[in-house]
């Protein structure tokens, strides 16, 4: 089977901030293939934001390699800017126009598209995100979940092939979180968008990720793999100062008690595993 194209590669990155704080992102290389959904999992202070800022060309490493879509983003970001969509953790730093329509229209207007083209692009993006009904609303008066969707519509308006999400579900209610996860999965499944997401919420990962990278405080990448593989390594979570997913912790404990159970990713998987053991007399 042919391996998908590598579109992000980071190798042993070192950055020194003006206050002399040093962040090393070493250990395992960070590699993203086209069409993947990748989650960067780690606590505050583990270097997640530092990594994203290098991918977006906002920082230049003092050591190491950073390549995005074949380019050095710190020096050539203008060559790849239109191919990348970004959703910041604080969307209020990203929303810059008073109305939903004008905010989503900002990028295509800035790139010189004709107003007819801008109208088509904005309508398409608002419909993709499911907020066409908010087109004339004032951004300031929207809920946090709605503002996240406005910022996402702006990130998608140029139809990027790579979407970078920094803690996109932080502070949202369960309904808004579920809606955004469904939307991200739709973009991946139906449009082939490659997605890189940072989070410290381990319980959402199973609903989204193809691959997970785990960081510890200080920046070392200590593990990478599928959700199934990572969830089976519960000791990694304590070293990363994270609680393991609830289901992984429960089924790991069952293993310690002598039951040969598979670590489930979802509640549905857990129910199926338990019922299977009950029916065969193992529980």
Image (cartoon, helix red, strand yellow):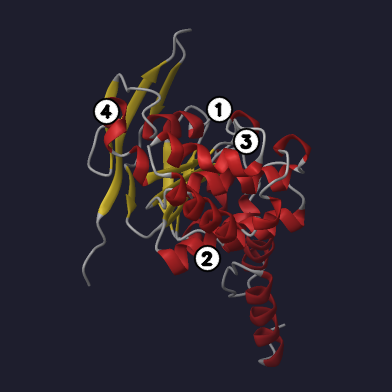
Question: Which residue is at a point 56% across and 36% down the rendered structure image?
Answer: 88
Left or right of 122? Residue 117 is left
Task: Check disc 1 and report the residue beneath it.
Answer: 45
Q: Residue at x 64, y 43 (%)?
A: 100
Q: Earlier in the sequence, mark 3 or mark 4?
A: 4
Could you classify mark 4 by the number of other residues whose Cα lies within 10 Å: few (under 14), some (14-19), or many (20 or more)?
Answer: some
Residue 249 versus residue 197 in the image, above or below:
below
Q: Looking at the image, do the residues carrying marks 1 and 4 touch, with CB atoms under 8 Å apart? A: no
Left or right, 25 with respect to 93, comes to: left
Which circle's residue, 1 or 4, is located before the other in the chain?
1
Q: CA distance from mark 1 to mark 2?
A: 31 Å
At x 64%, y 60%, the residue is: 130
Q: Residue 75 location in percent, x, y?
A: 26, 25
Q: CA distance from mark 3 to mark 1?
A: 20 Å
Q: Quadrant of the N terminus?
A: bottom left
Q: Is residue 48 above or below residue 148?
A: above
Residue 245 lies, in percent from the top left, at 65, 55
Q: Nearer the viewer, mark 1 or mark 2?
A: 2
Q: Which mark is residue 64?
A: 4
Q: What secondary structure is found at the residue carrying circle 4?
A: strand
Which residue carries the number 3 mark?
A: 91
Tell me which label, 2 or 3, sits earlier in the chain: 3
Crowdedness of circle 1 by 10 Å Cα count: few (<14), some, many (20+)?
some
- Dividing the picture into quadrants, the one containing residue 123 is bottom right
Q: Nearer the viewer, residue 224 or 238?
A: 224
């Amino acid at each position: 089977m042919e391996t998908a194209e590598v579109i992000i590669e980071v190798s042993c990155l070192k950055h020194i901030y003006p206050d002399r704080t040093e962040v090393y992102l070493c250990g395992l290389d960070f590699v993203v293939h086209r069409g993947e959904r990748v989650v960067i999992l780690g606590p505050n202070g583990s270097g997640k934001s530092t990594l994203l800022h290098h991918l977006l060309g906002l920082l230049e490493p003092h050591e190491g390699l950073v390549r995005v879509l074949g380019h050095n983003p710190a020096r050539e970001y203008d060559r790849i800017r239109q191919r990348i969509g970004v959703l910041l953790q604080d969307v209020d730093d990203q929303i810059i126009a008073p109305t939903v329509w004008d905010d989503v229209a900002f990028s295509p207007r800035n790139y010189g598209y004709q107003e007819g083209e801008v109208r088509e692009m904005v309508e398409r993006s608002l419909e993709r995100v499911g907020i066409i009904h908010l087109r004339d609303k004032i951004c300031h008066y929207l809920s946090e979940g709605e503002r996240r969707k406005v910022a996402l519509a702006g990130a998608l308006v140029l139809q990027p092939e790579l979407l970078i999400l920094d803690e996109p579900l932080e502070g949202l209610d369960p309904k808004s979180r579920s809606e955004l996860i469904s939307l991200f999965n739709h973009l991946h499944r139906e449009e082939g968008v490659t997605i890189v997401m940072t989070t410290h919420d381990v319980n959402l990962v199973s609903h989204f990720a193809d691959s997970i990278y785990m960081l510890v405080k200080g920046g070392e990448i200590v593990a990478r793999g599928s959700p199934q593989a990572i969830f089976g390594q519960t000791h990694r979570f304590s070293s990363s100062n994270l609680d393991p997913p609830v289901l992984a912790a429960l089924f790991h404990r069952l293993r310690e008690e002598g039951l040969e159970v598979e670590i489930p990713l979802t509640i549905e998987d857990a129910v199926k595993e338990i019922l299977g053991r009950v029916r065969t007399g193992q529980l």
